Image (cartoon, rainbow, N blue to C red):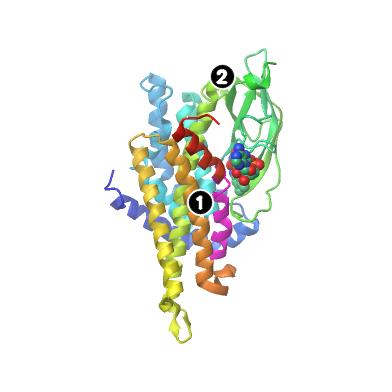
Amino acid sequence: MPAMFQLDEQSQMVGSVIRQWCQSTLVPKIPALEAGTEMPFDLMKKMAKAFGFDAMLGGAVKKRIAKLRTGDAPPDDDGEKTLSKSMGNPMMMHVVVKELSRVSPGFAMGFGVSIGLVGGAIVSKGTADQIEKWGLPVSTMQMIGSWCLTEPDAGSDAFGAMRTTAKPTADGGYVLSGSKTFITNGPGADVFLVYAKIDRGEPEAERGLATFIIERTMAGVTVGPPFKKMGMRDSPTSEVFFDEVKLGVEHLLGGKEKGKGGRTDTKDSLGSERSGVPSMAWGIIERCYDASLAYVRERKQFGRAIGEFQAVQLKITDLFLKLRTVENIVFRLAWMQQNSIKDMPYINASKAMSAQLAVEAAMTAIQIHGGYGYMEELGIEKLARDSKLLELGAGTTDINLLAAARQLIGVTE
Ligand SMILES: Cc1cc2nc3c(=O)[nH]c(=O)nc-3n(C[C@H](O)[C@H](O)[C@H](O)COP(=O)(O)OP(=O)(O)OC[C@H]3O[C@@H](n4cnc5c(N)ncnc54)[C@H](O)[C@@H]3O)c2cc1C
């Protein structure tokens, strides 16, 4: 691990090539992605190929499969670590997300959900066969993944109010029914990681939670049209419906039921999802700071650069501090990942704080840019729209802060 608070050479290099790729390849596509006339999935695949993610991650995942087959790895070994270690160090993935988020937080989100959440969960919790069949292609972006927890009536109360059920069948399989909403990558995903309660006729409160890997082409799976949204328009979101989908046990993540312990798998994924939000906030704030700094030096009013006015100067310091604060949060998260430290209150609270700072930074940047900031051309208004999602997705700000408080105090409610 490099010295904290300073990017190691490898991460700097990755950051700079991703930034170039964003300018040459991603930025020109943003209008079509935002308008929904183009989907981002081919571009995600191209990016993974261009930067050798497929080779890098694929190699690590194959090693894990071999270890599982020979019994050299405990089944609950942390596969998430396998993925981030294969990238050299965990900071590199944060830098990739940061660079993408400078121009398209939605693209970063879709990419992260597929590789990190879905790929990570299958590689860390799946059997060797599941990793080979789904974990490998999702981790190498040959397949796109969606992570399906939220339901129309189960948002913050995702576990308690969950209605999607999997009924065991006589042949050892399941029949799964239910619907999920607000699903990132839904319109283009090949594989859905679906959370459901196992229904053996017991009272709802006693049902265990399980995770299923479901392919888009299976009978009974349908996907709604992309939602029209305030922001993150370059990340297609939809409902996904499951109508009596017949699943063999090979679709049950990990190959066996864990009863109420199934929630732990979901909570691990939630932790990893929340750990990804600060690097998105980092990219948004860094772009706001860079653009604002350049603008206050060049924009003249009353015969002077606006950077000479104290009210404007204060806004620059505010953006600078927000940038350094979130950057430090990401350094700490990377250090925690490197050292396998799961500090959940920190993950929950820092996710909430980074999201808030990103929203505030985007609004401040618009204020600094005046009317030009409100226009689409500069791309700052997009960051303001997109940043708001960080306060909602992966648990709302209040839910994350309350979770951190409960963990710190040691109470359940
Ligand atoms: C663009 C987008 C992409 C998404 N992608 C995915 C995805 O890929 N997969 C997925 O599973 N989900 C996804 N989500 C869903 C997201 O995780 C939920 O929106 C989020 O968990 C909040 O749930 P909700 O929207 O139902 O809000 P609700 O739970 O209805 O909350 C409404 C309000 O009530 C507050 N509230 C609720 N309960 C409490 C409480 N106990 N104490 C205090 N306040 C409370 C909340 O903080 C919020 O302000 C996505 C959402 C969006 C908008």
Check disc 1 and give the amino acid type: Ala
From the viewer's perspective, tell me whether residue 129 is left or right of residue 201. left
The secondary element bearing badge 1 is classed as helix
User: Among all residues in the image, which is located at the extreme left?
Assistant: 3
Image quarter where the N terminus lies is: top left
Residue under the image location 59 percent in, 20 percent down? 249
Q: How many marks?
A: 2
- How many residues crowd mark 2 within 10 Å: few (<14), some (14–19), many (20+)? some
Give the residue at mark 2. Answer: 259
Q: Is residue 412 magenta?
A: no
Residue 184 visible in the snapshot:
no
**Ligand 1: image quarter:** top right
Residue under the image location 45 percent in, 49 percent down? 278
Q: Is residue 393 magenta?
A: yes
* Mark 2 / mark 1, whichever is N-terminal: 2
Residue 35 visible in the snapshot:
yes
Region in magenta:
380-397
Check disc 2 and give the amino acid type: Gly
Residue under the image location 59 percent in, 54 percent down? 234
Image quarter where the C terminus lies is: top right
Q: Residues under labels 2 and 1: Cα distance?
A: 34 Å
Q: Which mark is residue 327?
A: none
Give the residue at mark 1. Answer: 355
